[in-house]
Image (cartoon, rainbow, N blue to C red):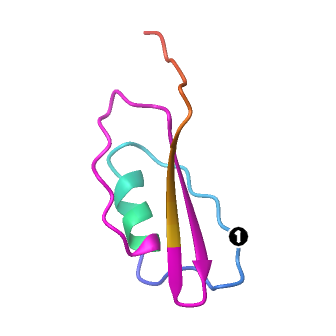
Amino acid sequence: MQHAPPETETVLVVGHSNTTDKLASILSGQKVSQIDESEYDHLFIVSRFGKKASLQRLQQGFVCDE
């Protein structure tokens, strides 16, 4: 990704554990710790306000049985 989405756009990003944390970091401008590939229950909400952004990291508690 070379540019962040426009300030007026709503964007849904779904990814794998090896890309989602990095993308949340790029979009928010904040450091995001790495997600282990065995974790399936993280949700990142990036809200942009002009040139500023906030980041919420939620954990939903999903369980994936193998």
Structural crowding at the residue carrying mark 1, measured as other residues with C-alpha within 10 Å and reported as few (<14), some (14–19) or many (≥20): few
| Residue 26 image-quadrant placement | bottom left
Please provide percent x and percent y for residue 33: 28, 52
- In the picture, measured across the screen, residue 6 lies left or right of residue 27, that is right
Q: Name the residue under label 1.
A: 10
Decide which of 18, 55 is in the foreground and name it.
55
Part of the protein shown in magenta: 28-53
**Up-down: is 22 above or below 26?**
above
Residue 46, how many percent across, how many down?
55, 65
Residue 53 location (% of width, % of height): 52, 77
Confirm whether the magenta stretch covers residue 22: no
Amino acid residing under circle 1: Thr
Image quadrant occupied by the C terminus: top left
Residue drawn at x 36%, y 70% as measured from the top left: 30
Residue for point 49% across, 63% down: 55
User: Would you say 51 lies left or right of 23 here?
Assistant: right
